[in-house]
Image (spheres, rainbow, N blue to C red):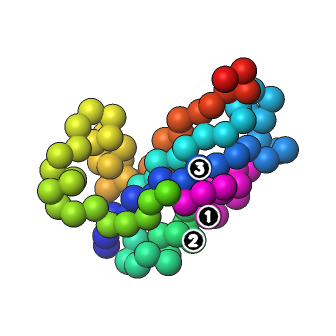
């Protein structure tokens, strides 16, 4: 299994509880999977279930071993959680007032 890393700009949909105060977000998502299309499908299913729509896919790739070795802090923790659980998603939000 490889570790795939996605960076996606997303917007909350009407059923997303954050729609009242979040205009958009960037999701950093780690997925373990056998192939890219399977990993992308897992990401799409997750975003749909959480009521986010993708406005732009910024990155989608398997990081090189040296990139993994350079991870620190929260980024390393997110990667490690994905290694254990198969998936990790972290969102950085733009609030409607910004």
Is the residue 45 above or below the residue 35 in the image?
above
| Mark identifier at residue 44 | 1
Task: For the residues labelled 1 and 2, say whether their Cβ atoms are less than 8 Å apart.
Answer: yes
Residue in the image at 70% along x and 55% along y: 53
Q: Is residue 50 magenta?
A: yes
Task: For the residues labelled 3 and 2, say whether their Cβ atoms are less than 8 Å apart.
Answer: no
Magenta stretch bounds: 44-57
Numbered circles on residues, count? 3
Q: Is residue 26 left or right of residue 4?
A: right
Where residue 24 sits, quadrant-wise, is: top right
Is the residue 91 above or below the residue 49 in the image?
above
CA distance for labels 1 and 2 = 5 Å
Q: Is residue 43 left or right of residue 15?
A: left
**Callout in the foreground (3, 1):** 3
**Quadrant (top left/top right/bottom left/bottom right) for the N terminus:** bottom left
Q: Position of residue 15 (x, y in %)?
A: 82, 44
The residue beneath circle 2 is 41
């Amino acid at each position: 299994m490889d570790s795939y890393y996605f960076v996606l700009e997303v917007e909350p949909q009407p059923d997303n509880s954050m729609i009242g105060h979040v205009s958009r977000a960037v999701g950093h998502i780690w997925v373990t999977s056998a192939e890219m299309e399977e990993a992308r499908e897992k990401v799409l299913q997750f975003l749909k279930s959480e009521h986010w729509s993708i406005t732009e896919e910024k990155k989608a790739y398997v990081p090189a071993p040296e990139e993994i070795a350079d991870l620190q802090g929260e980024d390393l923790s997110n990667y490690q959680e994905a290694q254990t659980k198969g998936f990790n998603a972290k969102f950085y939000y733009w609030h409607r007032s910004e």
